[in-house]
Amino acid sequence: MAIPRIKVNHFHTFYYQYESTLLDALEVQEIPAPYNCRGGYCGCCKVRLIDGEVEYVRETLLDMDEGEILTCCCVPKTHIEIEISES
Amino acid sequence: MSYSTFNPSAHDATLEPMFFGRSVNVARYDKQKYPIFEKLIEKQLSFFWRPEEVDLSTDRKDFMNMPEHEQHIFLSNLKYQTLLDSVQGRSPNVAFLPIVSLPELETWFETWAFSETIHSRSYTHIIRNIITEPSEVFDQIVTNEEIVKRAAAVTRLYDELIELTSVFSVHGAGQHVIAGKTYDVSMRNLKKKLYLTMVSVNVLEAIRFYVSFACSFAFAERAIMEGNAKIIKLIARDEALHLTGTQHILNILASGADDPDFKEIALECKDEAIAIFAEAAQQEKEWSSYLFRDGSMIGLNAKILSDYVEYITNVRMRALGFEDMFPAAQNPLPWMNAWLSSDNVQVAPQESEISSYLVGQIDNQVDDSDFDDFDL
Ligand code: FES
Ligand SMILES: [Fe+2]
Ligand SMILES: [Fe+2]
């Protein structure tokens, strides 16, 4: 399967380098993605998934609305497009 | 409706509401109405730590070398944290256990409160290590005007709820006059009080504590009081669970899915709920002026801390579906994130949250033959 491509609003599009989480992937790209616990239980890393699919690699303790993902807990499964809210 | 320590009725707890249904019968976790609370319990247990594991020997030296106004900041902050955890170590149990109806939520309250007692014990550990006479610090917690003022706001709703549910437990629902005082113990008023108490607990865990964490970590950002910061990091990891727990409870209540009354109550009490956030934010700002009254420290002053109060208040209000109370702004303390992350918490391997280790612990599927390849 093709290497997932990650498109982020207001930032550049890049290829996933198989970091252990999407949050790590964003940080490697120096995209200021929000986070706190990095453990799936604070909800700070929530972003909108506009397009594509992610795969959860860690259990989360939060209920997500449709179209929301926790970047500290998942990796891209296909090409994805996400939206990080400002502030 | 009097409380029973063991309700012998054969009812199915998964059909009860979270609160004010039948009291819990069997403490069983095989079926859960809300698996989230079971997950929180497991996570909290996997976080178990002991304050004595953290070495504070260099903190004492750091503390003695600090200018007086920084000692004031450090000790006042520690006193406030001690107050908050004194409240949290007992109140969820006293206030919520008599009225909870789900076993997983009941156990979450107990697990939550227990972790708060570890926090309290850690303050004793810290104070003992940096001060020769710990009483000097502890005794002032109940005499310091600034702290007492905030204690009243922190505990008011808890105390009112406990008073109401005590009357309810003895006299049942209705209007009761006891020793000349009238109590509105209607189910509606009980639920309202519970909802507002949960909001104020959320404010305590999600705003007040985080303001105090900012102060603790500001010292460690300068590479002083690092043992203290290690402990506060472990406390902060627990607090993130607690605030997730209260957010879940509040969001479930407000959805009306658990008990339709609460949907109305959440709407009806919206202004009061917002006022609880506003009061806390205001007090936390006043507190930052008190902390820095004799001078700022590198990296933190009353203005930056007040900006953080506004920032964190917005974040927490959004999580509950409220509008921002303050103008939207970036996090004024970006370095907080690294301290609030559980990724690099250093604990002994058997206490870390590596899930493979936990899975290994409870895996009964291992067959004797699986060990055939081991040479002992
Ligand atoms: S950083 Fe806390 S849930 Fe992802
Ligand atoms: Fe605590
Ligand atoms: Fe807590």
Image (cartoon, helix red, strand yellow):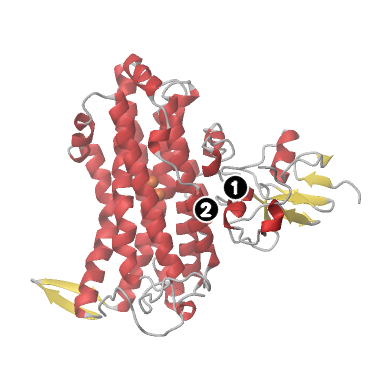
Residue at disc 2, secondary structure:
helix
Q: Nearer the viewer, residue B210 or B90?
A: B90
Above or below residue B316? Residue B135 is above
Res. A22 image quadrant? top right
Image quadrant holding the C terminus of chain B, namely: top right
Label 1 neighbour load within 10 Å: few <14, some 14-19, many 20+? many
Position of residue B33 measured from the top left corner of the image (x, y, whole percent)? 52, 73
In the image, taking residue B373 as reference, residue A86 lies left or right, namely left
* Dot 2: chain letter: B
Task: Specify whether residue B296 is in view.
Answer: no
Is the C-beta of the residue carrying label 1 under 8 Å from the nearest atom of ligand 1? Answer: yes
Q: Which residue is mark 1?
A: A39
**Marking on residue A67:** none
In the image, taking residue A13 as reference, residue A49 lies left or right, namely left
Position of residue B187 measured from the top left corner of the image (x, y, whole percent)? 31, 78
> In the orientation shown, which residue stands out farthest toward the front?
B376
